[in-house]
């Protein structure tokens, strides 16, 4: 175990610190801002482990449970305020989910103008809670918008690029983001304790400085630490196999009688019936408008051997169980850039063209649909969906359809209902929807209204963002909100 870092130096202001407004803070930043930090192997945190239970009771004003995106942001923010912070992480390394995100390049935020409407919480059905207006996250984002995290990234010399739709990725590796956050934690004197699995959190009678007892497992031994504030940043249930995700946050909330709502896989492939004709389309991809309820996403979909995936479907999946009827169909518009009347006009023109060449060998309507849709999809859609819907033979051509049938075909192309029977679950989910109800938390600090000193941040909270860096931005903003006041 290495000796603690020396943090005596002059101030180094960074844009992300403006919101803290702590003018007397003395610290040293890692990376480009402070080359004086001692060299260490990349990705190897300097750890200061807690003493065993047999020694004097350990105390830490702030204990952060979870060394992911939200946890490290909260820890370094609290540390910059001069608060002694101990971070407990179950895994042997910090930021495991960050490391594998974005194909290994970490889509760390999003600068799209859609930020204000890219998040949702579960509907409130408990009469003891008021229905949220969907704006819970906005105060956190006003205090810590994407620009502040981008400034932090730039201060460490990390190069990045915009891929599409406002999505920002590292040019090199997601490991750069993990290293940056580790270095910031170390520079803020945060005690990093890896391979430390939290077991329980309990309120205890006594002075404010020791109002919570955290029991955790370290080297197969149970140890405990007392804290004034506990920040739960242990995430959700997605990536259980690769990142060791657990339901710790939900169990802690339950132990304090806090409402946990709407927990389910999010941003996850959807399952279709085993006898669905779409199984023959495995590997086919096309651009659609995917609609679940009133929410619409225009991106690509991908048919799989189990069902349907791709960005548009992953987005829609987060809204699937929001409906009282869990079997609410997924509605696909397979010609999203044409209005229905434009689709009808095109079908009428093609039907008329087919009638003029009737002397040639007649062709099924799928041949015409393939002008605008992938061939395999057009063939399967016409044979198994459209012809049955219209009550005509699969070999029928557009010229065989009456005007009313063409109208119905246009409507089907714009509103194709696909029966969904489930999701591929947490092993394939990118996030966990639901969590600790936003009605239980302050939207300014993430502190529990009924349990002072207990905070929930990041994926532990019932706030879910769209695909594309939005969930990382929630982690940064909620972590900063809690770290700035705990």
Image: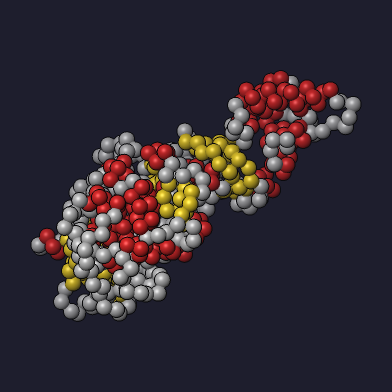
- Is residue 120 something one can see in this rendering? yes
Residue 22 picture quarter: bottom left
- The N terminus: image quadrant: bottom left
Above or below, 485 against 88 in this view is: above
In depth, the one of 302 and 74 nearer the eye is 74
Position of residue 15 measured from the top left corner of the image (x, y, whole percent): 29, 51
What scheme was used to colour the molecule? secondary structure
Residue 130 picture quarter: top left
**Residue at position x 37%, y 60% from top?**
156
Position of residue 35 measured from the top left corner of the image (x, y, whole percent): 33, 68
Q: In this view, which residue lies farthest toward the right?
A: 359
- The C terminus: image quadrant: bottom left
Above or below, 143 against 196 in this view is: above
Position of residue 19 measured from the top left corner of the image (x, y, whole percent): 24, 49
174 lies left or right of 36: right
Above or below, 246 against 438 in this view is: below
In depth, the one of 425 and 336 nearer the eye is 336
452 lies left or right of 356: left
**Residue at position x 29%, y 67% from top?**
186
1 lies left or right of 209: right
Total numbered circles: 0
**Residue at position x 31%, y 41% from top?**
138
- Is residue 222 something one can see in this rendering? no
Q: In this view, which residue lies farthest toward the top?
A: 403
Residue 357 picture quarter: top right
Position of residue 307 measured from the top left corner of the image (x, y, whole percent): 59, 48
**Residue at position x 26%, y 73% from top?**
5
In depth, the one of 442 and 176 nearer the eye is 176
């Amino acid at each position: 175990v290495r000796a603690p870092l020396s943090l005596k130096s002059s101030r180094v202001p960074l844009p992300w610190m403006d919101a803290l407004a702590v003018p007397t803070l003395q610290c040293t930043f890692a990376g480009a801002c402070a080359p004086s930090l001692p060299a260490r192997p990349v990705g190897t945190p300097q750890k200061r482990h807690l003493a065993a239970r047999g020694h004097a009771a350990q105390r830490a004003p702030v204990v952060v449970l979870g060394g992911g995106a939200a946890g490290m942001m909260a820890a370094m923010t609290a540390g910059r305020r001069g608060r002694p912070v101990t971070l407990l992480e179950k895994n042997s390394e910090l930021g495991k989910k960050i490391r594998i995100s974005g194909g290994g390049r970490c889509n760390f935020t999003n600068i799209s103008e859609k930020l204000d409407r890219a998040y949702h919480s579960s509907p409130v059905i408990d009469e003891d809670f008021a229905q949220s207006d969907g704006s819970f996250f906005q105060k956190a984002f006003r205090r810590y918008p994407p620009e502040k995290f981008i400034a932090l990234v730039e201060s460490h010399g990390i190069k990045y690029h915009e891929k599409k739709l406002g999505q920002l990725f590292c040019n090199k590796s997601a490991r750069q983001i993990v290293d940056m956050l580790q270095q910031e934690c170390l520079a803020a004197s945060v005690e990093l304790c890896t391979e430390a699995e939290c077991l329980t959190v309990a309120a205890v009678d006594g002075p404010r400085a020791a109002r919570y007892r955290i029991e955790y497992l370290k080297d197969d031994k149970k140890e405990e630490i007392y804290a004034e504030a506990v920040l739960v940043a242990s995430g959700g249930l997605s990536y259980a196999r690769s990142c060791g995700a657990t339901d710790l946050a939900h169990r802690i909330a339950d132990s304090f009688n806090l409402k946990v709502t709407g927990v389910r896989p999010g941003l996850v492939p959807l399952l279709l019936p085993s006898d669905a004709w779409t199984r023959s389309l495995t590997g086919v991809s096309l651009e659609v408008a995917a609609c679940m309820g009133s929410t619409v996403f225009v991106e690509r979909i991908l048919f799989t051997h189990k069902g349907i995936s791709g960005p548009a479907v992953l987005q829609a999946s987060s809204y699937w169980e929001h409906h009282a009827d869990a079997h609410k169909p997924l509605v696909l518009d397979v010609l999203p850039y044409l209005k229905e009347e434009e689709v009808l006009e095109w079908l009428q023109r093609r039907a008329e063209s087919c009638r003029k060449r009737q002397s040639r060998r007649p062709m099924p309507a799928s041949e015409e649909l393939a002008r605008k849709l992938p061939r395999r999809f057009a063939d399967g859609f016409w044979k198994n969906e459209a012809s049955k819907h219209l009550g005509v033979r699969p070999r029928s051509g557009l010229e065989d359809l009456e005007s009313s049938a063409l109208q119905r075909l246009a409507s089907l192309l714009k509103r194709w209902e696909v029966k969904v029977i489930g999701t591929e679950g947490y092993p394939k989910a990118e996030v966990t929807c639901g969590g600790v109800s936003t009605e239980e938390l302050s939207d300014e600090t993430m502190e529990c209204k009924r349990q002072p000193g207990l905070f929930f941040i990041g994926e532990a909270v019932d706030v879910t963002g769209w695909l594309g860096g939005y969930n990382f931005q929630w982690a940064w903003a909620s972590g900063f909100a809690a770290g700035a006041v705990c």
